[in-house]
Image (cartoon, rainbow, N blue to C red):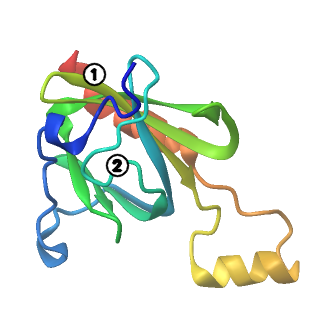
Amino acid sequence: MRLFRHASGGIPALVPIPPIAELPAAKMQASGRYLGTFDTDGQRVIGHSLAAKSAARLSLSAEALDVVRIAGSFRIRAETLRGARSAATFGGKAVDNLLVVRWTHEGLDWETGFRMDPARSVRDAAKAQMGRTKSTVRPEVDAWVRSISKISRGNA
């Protein structure tokens, strides 16, 4: 048994995002935490910085889901999206506000997890911390699931 089944040498290069100024108009945007990517066997994908957990900015357009992060940005083209779901666990760990995106990359089926940030803005986050809001601001994970699933319907 090989410890690192998916070394970066065995994984085709990820699709890079265009320059930030040239990103297509977003249907949805959110910040969150990139948690990792797993293959269909439940093995963590470790090549091309996919194993590095990091803060991320998600931007969903008709063209793609762009994942902007310091650890390595990448694009999941719309035609490779296979759906999305909310879940309670990822990689065997409980995660609140979890969005799991299913996609393919060069014939490989993957699931990528994001813990979505609850604040819609810095101001909302500050109000929630000070207790000045009537309810906590919750991320719109279900809206992301619906939007990604709608885009992916024709890709099966």
Total number of numbered discs in the rendering: 2
Q: Which mark is residue 67?
A: none
Give how far across and how far down residue 53 sits, in percent: 48, 57
Residue contact between numbered discs 1 and 2, judged by CB atoms under 8 Å: no
Q: Is residue 95 left or right of residue 146?
A: right
- Label 1: state its secondary structure: helix
Marks 1 and 2, Cα distance to the nearest angstrom? 25 Å
- Label 2: state its secondary structure: loop
Residue type of the residue flagged with mark 2? Leu
Residue drawn at x 27%, y 21% is 153
- Circle 2 residues within 10 Å: few <14, some 14–19, many ≥20: many
Give how far across and how far down residue 46 sits, in percent: 35, 43
Residue denoted by label 2: 50
Residue denoted by label 1: 153
Residue drawn at x 45%, y 45% is 36
Residue type of the residue flagged with mark 1? Arg
| Residue 107 position (above or below residue 11) | above
Which quadrant is home to the C terminus?
top left
Give how far across and how far down residue 88 sits, in percent: 68, 33
Which quadrant is home to the N terminus?
top left
